[in-house]
Structure formats: C-alpha cells, structure tokens
C-alpha cells in the first residue's frame, strides 16, 4: 500500500465533518484528494498528529456510522 507522506499534507485542504459542533469543540477534519488514503486530524490541534486510513477502511467506517 502506498501512503501519503506527512510532508505532502502541508498544503492539504482540510474540511470539518458536517457533524462537528459549531462551537469549535469536538471537530474532526479530513483532507480530500488522496485517492488511496484518508488523512484525518483534530481541528483543535492542526499541527499535531494525523491519522491515515485506507480509503476502503474509511468508507466502511463511515457507512457503519450512518447505519447505526
């Protein structure tokens, strides 16, 4: 599996989850445009660690959340 090196995320466009609270609290952000992985970070700590999920795994996770 090829992954997106962290340095490739310096110019990434991050977007907040549509389910994030509007008060700037618990927000999850993802970066689009990486076909094989979905980079995820905590919006309160944008310089902190990023998690990388395989696209297929992220899709399964989101699908499961929608069904719950």
Image (cartoon, rainbow, N blue to C red):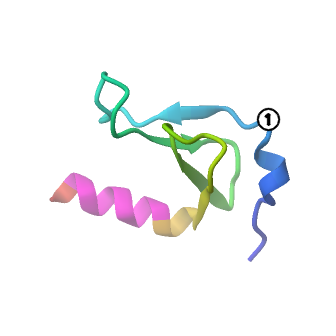
Q: Is residue 64 magenta?
A: yes
Of the pair 36 and 24, the residue shown nearer to us: 24
When the figure is inspected, residue 35 is found, relative to residue 64, above or below; the finding is above
Where's residue 5, x and y in %? 81, 60
Is residue 8 depicted above or below 61 in this figure? Answer: above
Check the image and name the residue furthest to the bottom: 1
Magenta span:
58-66
25 vs 34, left or right, is left
Point out the image quarter for the N terminus: bottom right
13 is higher (above) or lower (below) than 38: above
- Is 6 placed left or right of 13 in the picture? right
Residue at 32% across, 58% down: 63
Q: Quadrant of the C terminus?
A: bottom left
User: Label 1: which residue?
Assistant: 11
Depth check, front residue: 62 or 30? 30
Q: What secondary structure characterizes most of the magenta part?
A: helix
């Amino acid at each position: 599996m090829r992954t997106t090196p962290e340095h490739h995320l310096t110019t990434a466009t991050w977007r907040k989850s549509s389910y994030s609270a509007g008060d700037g609290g618990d927000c999850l952000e993802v970066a689009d445009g990486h076909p094989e992985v979905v980079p995820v970070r905590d919006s309160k700590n944008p310089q902190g660690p990023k998690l990388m999920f395989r696209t297929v795994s992220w899709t399964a996770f989101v699908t499961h959340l929608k069904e719950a």
